[in-house]
Image (cartoon, coloured by chain):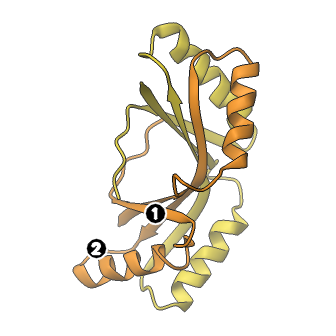
Chain colours: A yellow, B orange
Amino acid sequence: MARVVVDVMLKPEILDPQGQAVEGALARLGLAGVASVRQGKRFEIDLAGELDTATRAQLHELAGTLLSNPVIEDYSLRENVEDAS
Amino acid sequence: MARVVVDVMLKPEILDPQGQAVEGALARLGLAGVASVRQGKRFEIDLAGELDTATRAQLHELAGTLLSNPVIEDYSLRENVEDAS
C-alpha cells in the first residue's frame, strides 16, 4: 500500500481571499506576528501495491490537471508520507 | 521567519463525498489500484520571528478551533516545512 499526498496551493502571485480571512481572524484572536496565511487543498491518495515509474508519471499528470488548475495553482506531490498529529 | 503548516482532514469515520468523487474520477481517468482518496485543507502560516512555547500552544489552540472543527476533523501541525514541488 502506497500513500501519496498531493498539496495544491494557489500560486504566490494569485490573491488568496480565504487565506487573508484566516490571517485576519488569527490576528484578531490574539496570535502575534502573523505575516501571511495561504489556504489550499490536500489530497491523501492510497494506492494498492507499490508505486512504479508509470504510476508515478500518471499521478503527476492527474495532479496537474484533475486535482489542480495549472493556471492559478501549483501542486506538490509527496510519497509515503506518515500521519502525524 | 517561521513557517507552520496545518493540515486539516476529516476524521476517518466521517464520510468524505469530495474524496469519493476524486477517487471515482481518478479511476475513470485510468489510474489503477486507487484504494481511497480523502480531501482536506492545508494552511500555510508564516510568522515573524521564531516560535516559542507560548506561540506554539496558541497555534495548537487555534488549529483545533478556528482552522478545524474538532467534532468532525483532525488537524496536524508541522513546523518549518520546506516547499517541495
Residue B73 vertical position relative to residue B33 in the rendered view, above or below: below
**B32 displayed left or right of A82:** right
Residue B61 visible in this rendered orientation of the protein:
yes
Q: What chain is tagged by disc 2?
A: B
Residue B23 coordinates in the image, percent (x, y): 67, 32
Residue B58 vertical position relative to residue A83 in the rendered view, above or below: below
Query: Disc 2 on helix, strand or loop?
Result: loop
Q: Quadrant of residue A79?
A: top left
Query: Disc 1 on helix, strand or loop?
Result: strand
**B82 displayed left or right of A59:** left
**B52 displayed left or right of A44:** left
Amino acid at dot 1:
Tyr
Closest to the observer: A54 or B1? A54
**What label does residue B7 carry, if any?**
none
Residue B10 vertical position relative to residue B36 in the rendered view, above or below: below
Tags 1 and 2 touching, CB below 8 Å = no
Q: What chain is tagged by disc 1?
A: B
Labels 1 and 2: the sequence-earlier one: 2
What residue is at 55 percent from the left and 70 percent from the top?
B68
Residue A43 coordinates in the image, percent (x, y): 58, 42
Q: Disc 1 to disc 2, how far (Cα)?
A: 19 Å
Amino acid at dot 2:
Leu
Closest to the observer: A36 or A7? A7
Which residue is disc 1 drawn over?
B75
Residue B6 coordinates in the image, percent (x, y): 46, 61
Quarter occupied by the N terminus of chain B: bottom left
Which residue is disc 2 drawn over?
B51
